[in-house]
């Protein structure tokens, strides 16, 4: 009946198999998702089982549904872990930080120098500026600020940085704000390219 499109029949099947879908989903981990996403994938597998089940085959609907649910969940997990998606799963925006949403302080991409032009003189100056910035950072940043900046630039979220350094996210945010101010002061004091 569910195959013919009767919503009440499909709802009964979902109620009957929902526990199995949850149990199956709890055995897997989805990068960038949570258990509800895996349950949703399992329900998609159940839908496909209803759609594709053929009574002329020797398998029972229960076995077919379990196979479809499991395969759908495994496909979702494999798709999420493909290297193709790594840049998106690890993306950290320099143009939007939690602090930037609440105040008018510049973001990291506004503070860090960018390529001005491809002229050799500007490239030499940029190289010198980078050396100067690295030297400045190593001398004016505290150990905490250096660690926070390094982890943040490696792509970790505020929460992950806080966990790794065993502090709270406010401490991480404050450290990055101090880094931005120090880098901005250093760049303003040099002001070679402008």
Image (tube, rainbow, N blue to C red):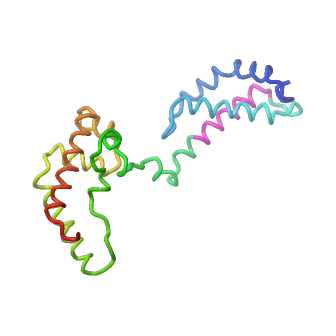
Figure quadrant of residue 194: bottom left
Task: Say left or right for 50 vs 153.
Answer: right
Please name the residue shown 75% across and 33% down the image: 49
Examine the structure image and report whether residue 186 is included in the region drawn in magenta: no
Please name the residue shown 25% across and 39% down the image: 172
Task: Say left or right for 30 vs 66.
Answer: left
Dominant secondary structure of the residues highlighted in magenta in the image: helix
Q: Is residue 169 above or below residue 113?
A: above
Where does the magenta region start and end? 60-76
Q: Is residue 104 above or below residue 52?
A: below
Please provide percent x and percent y for residue 140. Answer: 11, 52
Task: Say left or right for 85 vs 140.
Answer: right
Please name the residue shown 35% across and 49% down the image: 155
Please provide percent x and percent y for residue 48. Answer: 74, 35
Please name the residue shown 51% across and 46% down the image: 81
Task: Say left or right for 21 vs 105.
Answer: right
Please provide percent x and percent y for residue 7. Answer: 79, 24
Q: Of residues 76 and 140, which is closer to you in this image?
A: 140
Name the quarter where the N terminus is drawn: top right
Examine the structure image and report whether residue 75 is included in the region drawn in magenta: yes
């Amino acid at each position: 009946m569910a195959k013919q499109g009767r919503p009440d029949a499909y709802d009964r099947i979902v109620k009957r198999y929902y526990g199995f879908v949850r149990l199956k989903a709890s055995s897997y981990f989805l990068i960038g998702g949570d258990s509800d996403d895996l349950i949703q994938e399992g329900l998609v597998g159940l839908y496909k089982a209803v759609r594709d089940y053929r009574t002329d085959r020797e398998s029972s609907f229960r076995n077919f549904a379990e196979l479809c649910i499991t395969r759908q969940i495994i496909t979702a997990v494999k798709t999420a872990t493909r290297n193709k998606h790594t840049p998106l799963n690890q993306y950290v925006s320099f143009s939007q930080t939690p602090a930037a949403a609440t105040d008018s302080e510049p973001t990291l991409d506004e503070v860090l120098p960018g390529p001005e032009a491809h002229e050799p003189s500007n490239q030499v100056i940029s190289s010198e500026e980078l050396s100067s910035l690295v030297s400045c950072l190593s001398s004016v940043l505290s150990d905490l600020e250096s660690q926070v900046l390094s982890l943040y630039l490696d792509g970790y979220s505020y929460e992950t940085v806080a966990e790794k350094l065993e502090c709270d996210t406010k401490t991480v945010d404050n450290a990055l704000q101090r880094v931005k101010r120090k880098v901005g002061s250093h760049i303003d004091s040099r002001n070679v390219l402008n």
